[in-house]
Image (cartoon, helix red, strand yellow):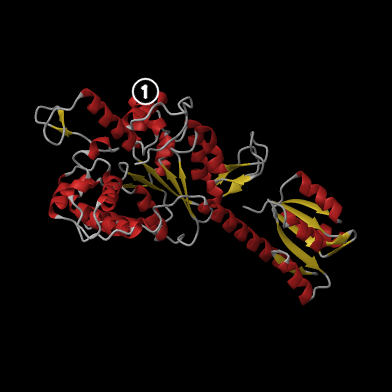
């Protein structure tokens, strides 16, 4: 519920007390005052979500306070009230930034209508602020593929989308799990409501609870204002818990309560907030194994795994490789302004013969590189793909295994130990979505060691930030 704290500024005692009681009955925190000075004192002490201000007050005009509020970085919505309402007065208030205008006396139904409109508007503003700060490359991209596996996946999505069931999407890194989640949301009855994504692997552990549930002002150092969490932003819509297996056991317990009761408390708060959200989670791990290792709560797994969806890796639908390559080719040709005639036969063969350990994400990166390196007006060639040489240093590219069980390069030569280590590190990064902290844990080395190795491969010295052991980073490819 985005609207929580309301100030009523009204000099008529009967109207003020009546309005205060109505709002308290609706479980709002209310401060009721009879002049502008007292309202200013409340505004100086805390942040407020909504103000109901009379136009005429003993110590001035309500429009004066309205103008002052417009200069504040954190300003509440303002509803102006008047017992002598005129068209000119209403127009002036709206021009000064008022959210609505009420003529006294007003009914309970009118108050209800204004509050519902204000709550909906407040949520839309906060969702818009969140989305404007999100890099959302996946939006607008469809699930592509003509293979039977993809047709079955799309049929399952259509069947699941029309329900409110919680969905657990499992698959390797780069297979398009987020695209599946977005397709479920777009085809659901909640399609017009927010779709909010939280990357559980990218948010530091000490902040994940605040990201999920929000926090109150002063809940911890740096919490200067109240902040709604992702579950509140997703109210009436869908929340995507990306890589949910990375959530700590403490937050897992609180997440379980939200799934069971559909209610939460912000960090540092004691108000119980009801949320109506559809939960979709993704993971590139086998959660059953994590449950057996006591790394993931069994009861939470059961709550998430109501409808499991497995996204097939690209190597199991090779018939889609060239089709996807053509789609990516057209997309990146437009993006980079390169005229590409098509895909040459040697390029098609190279694409079909590659094992694609990085799945669709790896294919997308390979095609973008090929488009950029291609001459204007030419076809994509196998040489520009870089699968034989450049893939050695590309995250997610694996080495070939010879008949004797040893790792070999594309020409059958035995790999050196250093080259084998290099490929293994990049394979670990690909499995962890290029998250260095998690890749270091997977390889059982320190983040400093991993960073130094990557700087070595890039031909650089030690980075200036090498002392920051816990920094979350991504590799630019």
Can you give x and y, in whole percent of width and height, for residue 207 in the image?
54, 36
- Looking at this view, name the residue that lies furthest to the front: 375
- The quadrant in which residue 288 appears is top left
Indicate the secondary structure of the residue bearing disc 1: loop
- Looking at this view, name the residue that lies furthest to the right: 58
Quadrant (top left, top right, bottom left, bottom right) of the C terminus: top left
Please give the name of the residue rendered at 77% of the width and 49% of the height, measured from the top-left corner: 43
Q: How many marks?
A: 1
Q: Residues within 10 Å of mark 1 (few under 14, many from 20)?
A: few
- Looking at this view, name the residue that lies furthest to the bottom: 87
Query: In front: 17, or 58?
Result: 58
- 140 on left or right of 273: left
Q: On the image, numbered disc 1 is attached to which residue?
A: 445
Can you give x and y, in whole percent of width and height, for residue 355 in the image?
19, 42
The reply to whether residue 286 is in sight is no
Can you give x and y, in whole percent of width and height, for residue 354 in the image?
18, 44
- Looking at this view, name the residue that lies furthest to the left: 403
The reply to whether residue 471 is in sight is yes
- 234 on left or right of 85: left
Can you give x and y, in whole percent of width and height, for residue 328 in the image?
28, 55
- The quadrant in which residue 344 appears is bottom left
Q: Where 388 sits versus 328, above or below?
A: above
Query: In front: 396, or 264?
Result: 396
- 107 on left or right of 425: right
- The quadrant in which residue 423 appears is top left
Please give the name of the residue rendered at 54% of the width and 38% of the height, measured from the top-left corner: 209
């Amino acid at each position: 519920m985005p609207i929580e704290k309301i100030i009523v500024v009204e000099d008529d005692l009967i109207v003020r007390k009546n309005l205060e009681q109505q709002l308290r009955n609706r479980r709002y925190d209310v401060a009721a005052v009879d002049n502008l000075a007292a309202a200013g004192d409340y505004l100086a002490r805390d942040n407020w979500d909504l103000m109901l201000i009379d136009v005429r007050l003993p110590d001035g005009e309500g429009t004066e306070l309205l103008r002052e509020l417009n200069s504040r970085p954190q300003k509440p919505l303002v509803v102006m009230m008047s017992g002598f309402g005129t068209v000119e007065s209403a127009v002036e208030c709206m021009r000064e930034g008022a959210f609505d205008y009420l003529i006294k006396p007003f009914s309970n139904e009118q108050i209800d209508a204004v509050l519902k409109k204000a709550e909906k508007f407040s949520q839309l503003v906060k969702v818009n602020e969140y989305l404007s700060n999100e890099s959302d490359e996946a939006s607008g991209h469809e699930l592509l593929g003509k293979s039977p596996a993809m047709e079955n996946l799309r049929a399952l999505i259509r069947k699941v989308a029309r329900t409110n069931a919680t969905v657990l999407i499992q698959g390797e890194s780069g297979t398009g799990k987020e695209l599946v989640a977005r397709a479920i949301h777009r085809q659901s009855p909640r399609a017009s409501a927010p779709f909010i994504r939280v990357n559980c692997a990218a948010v530091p552990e000490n902040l994940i609870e605040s990201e999920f549930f929000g926090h109150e002002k002063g809940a911890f150092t740096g919490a200067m204002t109240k902040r709604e969490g992702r579950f509140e932003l997703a109210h009436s819509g869908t929340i995507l818990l990306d890589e949910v297996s990375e959530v700590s056991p403490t937050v897992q317990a609180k997440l379980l309560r939200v799934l069971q009761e559909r209610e939460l408390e912000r960090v540092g708060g004691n108000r119980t907030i009801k949320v109506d959200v559809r939960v979709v989670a993704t993971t590139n791990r086998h959660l059953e194994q994590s449950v057996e290792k006591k790394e993931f709560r069994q009861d939470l797994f059961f709550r998430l795994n109501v409808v499991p969806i497995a996204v097939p890796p690209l190597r199991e639908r090779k018939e889609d490789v060239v089709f996807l390559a053509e789609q990516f080719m057209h997309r990146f040709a437009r993006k980079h302004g390169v005229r590409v005639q098509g895909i040459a036969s040697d390029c098609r063969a190279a694409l079909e013969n590659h094992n694609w350990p990085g799945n669709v994400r790896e294919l997308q990166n390979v095609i973008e590189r090929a488009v950029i390196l291609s001459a204007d007006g030419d076809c994509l060639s196998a040489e520009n793909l870089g699968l034989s040489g450049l893939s050695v240093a590309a995250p997610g590219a694996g080495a070939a295994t010879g008949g004797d069980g040893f790792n070999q390069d594309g020409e059958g030569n035995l790999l050196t130990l250093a080259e084998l280590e290099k490929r293994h590190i990049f394979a670990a990064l690909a499995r962890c979505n290029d998250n260095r902290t998690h890749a270091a844990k997977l390889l059982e080395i320190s983040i400093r060691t991993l960073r130094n190795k990557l700087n070595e491969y890039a031909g650089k010295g030690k980075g200036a930030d090498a002392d920051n052991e816990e920094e979350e980073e991504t590799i630019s490819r």
